[in-house]
Image (cartoon, rainbow, N blue to C red):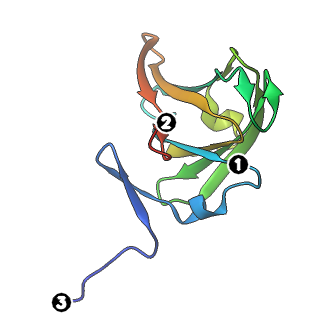
């Protein structure tokens, strides 16, 4: 019997294996990487993304630094399906409603890689359209902070 093995590196996040070959290709200038392991538009739901700036002083940028954030959407096989760029100011929330189509994709389910040049917090909410009941997912900080 032949054993099958994945072609690239996988990361286990919330009991889900995510292919991360593309994480090695972080945008230039990005020092921080975060993962949101599940976003969807399936089963009468939508996913919103929140990006929060909280740093008030930065060695690299000085006082009140803005964070340049790149969001990449991957399908369940790890193929890039969409992307977008955002600028997040200190003490600001940037909310991206219905994130999958907002990133230019029509996939049903996937995951997000988020890169930033300043520390941020990120989260996603999966909202059931029929009731508007949300669930929350905090981003996984790959730096381990």
- Please determine whether, in this image, residue 99 is positioned above or below residue 93: below
Residue shown at the point (50%, 46%) measured from the top left: 143
Q: Which residue position holds label 1? A: 30
The answer to which image quadrant residue 93 occupies is: top right
**Quadrant of residue 101 within the rendered picture:** top right
Q: Pick whichever, 90 or 124, lies toward us.
A: 90
Q: Residue at x 77, y 39 (%)?
A: 85
**Tag 2 or tag 1, which sits nearer the N-term?**
1
> In the rendered view of the protein, which quadrant contains the N terminus?
bottom left
Disc 3 on helix, strand or loop? loop
Query: In x, y percent, where is residue 142?
Result: 48, 47
Where residue 61 sits: x, y (%)? 81, 33
Residue 33 point in image, percent of width and height:
58, 46
Q: CA distance from mark 3 to mark 2?
A: 36 Å
**Which residue is identified by label 3?**
1
Q: Is residue 119 visible?
A: yes
Name the residue carrying label 2: 40
**Element assignment for label 2:** strand
- Of circles 1 and 2, which is in front? 1
In the rendered structure, the answer to whether residue 97 lies left or right of residue 39 reads right
Q: Nearer the viewer, residue 139 or 97?
A: 139
In this image, 102 relative to 132: left or right? right
Which residue appears farthest toward the left when viewing the image? 1
Foreground mark, 1 or 3, reads 1
Given residues 106 and 57, the one toward you in this image is: 57
Q: What x and y, as percent, mark residue 135?
A: 40, 20
Q: CA distance from mark 1 to mark 2?
A: 26 Å
Disc 2: CA contacts within 10 A as few (<14), some (14-19) or many (>=20): many
């Amino acid at each position: 019997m032949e054993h099958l093995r994945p072609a690239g590196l996988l990361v286990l996040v919330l009991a889900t294996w995510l292919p991360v070959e593309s994480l090695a290709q972080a945008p230039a200038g990005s020092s921080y990487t975060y993962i949101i392991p599940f976003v969807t538009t399936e089963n009468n739901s939508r996913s919103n993304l929140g990006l929060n700036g909280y740093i008030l002083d930065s060695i690299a940028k000085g006082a009140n630094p803005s964070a340049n954030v790149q969001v990449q959407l991957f399908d369940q096989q790890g193929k890039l399906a969409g992307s977008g760029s955002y600028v997040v100011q200190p003490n600001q929330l940037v909310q991206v409603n219905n994130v999958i189509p907002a990133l230019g994709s029509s996939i049903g389910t996937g995951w997000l890689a988020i890169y930033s040049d300043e520390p941020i917090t990120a989260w996603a909410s999966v909202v059931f359209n029929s009731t508007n009941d949300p669930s929350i997912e905090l981003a996984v900080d790959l730096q381990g902070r």
